Amino acid sequence: MFGRSRDPSPTAVLELGRLRLPSGVLVVTDMGLLDGWAAEGPPRPVADMSEDDERAAAGADDWELAGPDEERAAVIAHREIAGCSGGRFYDVPPAHAADLRAEIDEVLVGLDVEVVVLPGRISPHDRAVRAGDTLEREYYVHGVASVAVSGLPADRDLRVTACPTASEPDFFAEVTVHVADGDAVRRFRFGAVAVDHARVLFADVDALDSWQHDEPLDGNADVAFWGRDADQAAADLGAGRIADGSHGWSDLQLDDALVHHERVGVWMDDHPAAGLALDFRPHSHHYAVMRQIRERNVGAILLAGARMLGVGALGDGFFDLVADYDRDEALVALTLLLED
């Protein structure tokens, strides 16, 4: 079960906060993709999907390896075939089905196993719950990997710390969830978290069912823009400064915010060399965490009895979640490794 011995940790340790996981299942995921989360049914479309991708996702299937050799096949497929989660393949679009079946047949040749198309789509919630009990711990939504870990304490808070990188102190080298006291002597890789939005959320799987990613809780939104010619754009559009130092408008009714967002977009189209970035920020759960991350690289939120933490100060990429165990094989800590 166990891999190499634990490497020495960096000396600087920052206290980020505490988690509470009433379900006992931790999800570590790219927070920017949680608009795809669903408690039931298939994943929702995410913001950066094209219309073609949305159509493909709507017609996709979920597959499972079944047969006398299914356990062995699941281990091999996870190692050899991208996107395999505990013997399942989620969100398989019709256009890729034939190629994936051919790859499965090639990799699992000689094993008594077949591909079964599941009768209903599996929700992100159920994918995470199932993955938390598998050896690999990874699950996929729209082809993007997250990690789930089950069996964690549900009746107490878990301390979370981070170590900054040596070269860039404002960035984190690793983030650790402390599960129990003890001396860690072995480390095991649970899986990789794919990050495309420079932030992750450490979350309770059941609490995510109450997450509102884009829908404003108070009916309001902010509009922010920044970049080389932001001062000129602000003068032309009558925008002020908002809390994070960007130009824009805060606490607008949703309809008014959409109007201002469109006005900035038109200005950007008319000034393509202005070097502006534009952000629409509805007052959602995502917004509440991001507002804190912009100030101090970490944000906490209480939701459905859980306490969850969003962490910035990292780049994009694939980051391993590793588990540290003591000599009695008890779990001591979970660490997300954020640099090579």
Image (tube, rainbow, N blue to C red):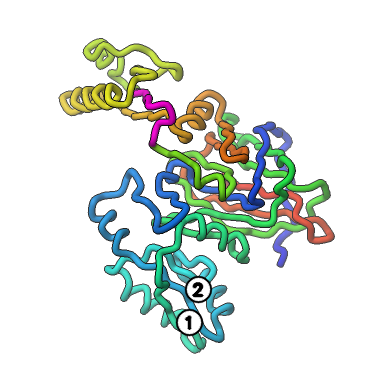
Instruction: Please give the name of the residue rendered at 32% of the width and 45% of the height, measured from the top-left corner.
Output: 48
Q: Is residue 47 magenta?
A: no
Q: Is residue 238 above or below residue 148?
A: above
Q: Is residue 129 above or below residue 163?
A: below
Task: Please state the horizontal and vertical placement of residue 45, each as a whole percent of the image.
Answer: 34, 50
Of residue 74 and residue 36, the one placed in the foreground of this image is 36
Task: Please provide percent x and percent y for residue 166.
Answer: 62, 35
Q: Earlier in the sequence, mark 1 or mark 2?
A: 2
- Checking the image for residue 108, the label placed there is 1
Looking at the rendered structure, the secondary structure element under dot 1 is loop
Residue 226 vs 30, above or below: the answer is above
Residue 226 location (% of width, % of height): 34, 22
Decide if residue 187 is on the left or right side of residue 263: right
Mark 2 lies on a secondary structure that is helix
Label 1 vs label 2: CA separation? 7 Å
Horizontal arrangement in the rendering, residue 195 relative to residue 11 (left or right):
left
Residues marked 1 and 2 touching at CB (< 8 Å): yes
Question: Is residue 217 part of the magenta span, yes or no?
Answer: yes
Amino acid marked by disc 1: Leu
Image quadrant occupied by the N terminus: bottom right
Q: Amino acid at mark 2?
A: Ala
Q: Which residues are magenta?
A: 215-223
Query: Can see residue 141?
Result: yes
Tag 2 residue: 77
For image coordinates 48% across by 31% down, the residue present is: 290
Q: Residue 33 sits in which quadrant?
A: top left
Identify the residue at horizontal 59%, vertical 39% (top origin): 308
Q: Nearer the viewer, residue 76 or 290?
A: 290
Question: Would residue 155 be found to the left or right of residue 114 on screen?
Answer: right
Any part of residue 275 in sight: no
